[in-house]
Image: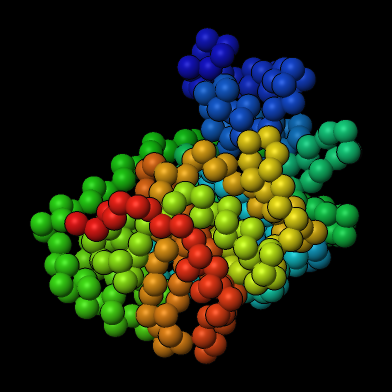
Amino acid sequence: MSKTGQTAAELTPEEIRAEYERLIEQNGMRARNAAREMGISEGQLVAARVGEEAIRLSDDAEAILKSVVSLGEVMALTRNEHCVHERKGVYENASFFKHGPMTTGLFVNPDIDLRLFMTHWKHAFAVTETGKAGARKSLQFFDGMGEAIHKIYLTNHSKEAAYDDLVAMHRHAEQVASIEIEGAKPKPEERPDSEVDWEGFRSAWENLKDTHDFFPMLRKFKVGRVQALKKIGTDFAAELDNSATRLVLDRARDSECEIMVFVGNKGCIQIHTGPVNKLVEAGGWFNVLDPKFNLHLDETGISHTWVTKKPSADGIITAVEVFDKNNELIVTFFGKRKPGIPELGGWREIVESLPRQEVSNVA
């Protein structure tokens, strides 16, 4: 139920726009929070603005993404409930792969580094938001539930004429001010520990050759990620104090250790590789505010934190994995590395210095 006393289905595009304008004027509210206040998804809010601040784009997100390179430098934004990852760069080196009905995508660059799961990319819009600093143009992508997957904002160095050309090229023939919303799919239930082949799972973990094989291994044994961390043993996974996330960033800055920061949702994972410098606490969020990389972390959403060690052809790969109360990943940290190169000794020193939980969760 929205604050207007109507359900989301009952609100017309005109009512959504009027309520959004009221919330902005009264509270300076961002679109995501305003949509939540109204009891609708952010995608529904953006769709309601079609014909005014928004233009509906074609359903071919892959084609749109391949065109973004023409814009030059832009700002990529990927978020989940508790963390926002922003990185400036150029969308070069796009590649997409079909696996039966599934399509995955990659952008592999020093600045724009993305892993894409295109099944979830359902709705696309070009959005112009006018604020005190003037007009801010973006491309915004949403899943079937209207949740934001990825956004691309123009910067002062972007080619605005190329943006206008891209929007014209990919403009949807039907400029309707609403989207169909899919129901939430239930999360698969974890198998009871008693039904899992833990001996086989342990052997598979010990024999990992690539960190990309970790998720397929979980699927093969039908094990939840946190369930696996609790059972595998402290030589491969140990729970940390939840202060570890801030300490990772503090110590990476102080030691000038370059790190990798992964933030994602079901449709996109965005990666920063490099140093972190300016750390600021503001408005209840802990932030990295560097020229090309910004991170905004809501530490109140952190439920548990783990250090994990995964074998690979290049030696052990150590990560700090941060989860919310629903066992969803918020953010993951690695030391900077490339295939064929062992991980940084300085990164291992940072991880070894992090405080462990006093009580082990290993059964």
Residue 18 sits above or below residue 363 on the image: above
Horizontal and vertical percent position of residue 257:
65, 72
- Identified at 66% across, 52% down, the residue is 295
Along the line of sight, the residue nearer the viewer: 302 or 3: 302
> Dividing the picture into quarters, in which one does residue 101 lie?
bottom left
Q: Quadrant of residue 20?
A: top right
Indicate left or right for 176 with 321 as reference.
Answer: right
At x 58%, y 37%, the residue is 43
On the picture, is 263 further left or further right than 296?
A: left
Residue 271 seen by the camera: no
Compared to residue 352, the image places residue 158 above or below, namely: above
Residue 296 percent across, percent down from the top left: 64, 47
Q: Residue 124 location, x and y as percent?
A: 62, 47
On screen, residue 180 versus residue 192, left or right, reads right
Vertical placement of residue 207 versus 170, above or below? below
Q: Quadrant of the C terminus?
A: bottom left
Question: Going by the image, does 283 lie left or right of 103?
Answer: right
Can the viewer see residue 138?
yes
Outermost residue, left direction? 194
The chosen color scheme is rainbow
Give coordinates of residue 269: x percent, y percent.
54, 60
At a point 63% along the width and 36% down the height, the residue shown is 284
Residue located farthest toward the top when viewing the structure as drawn: 5
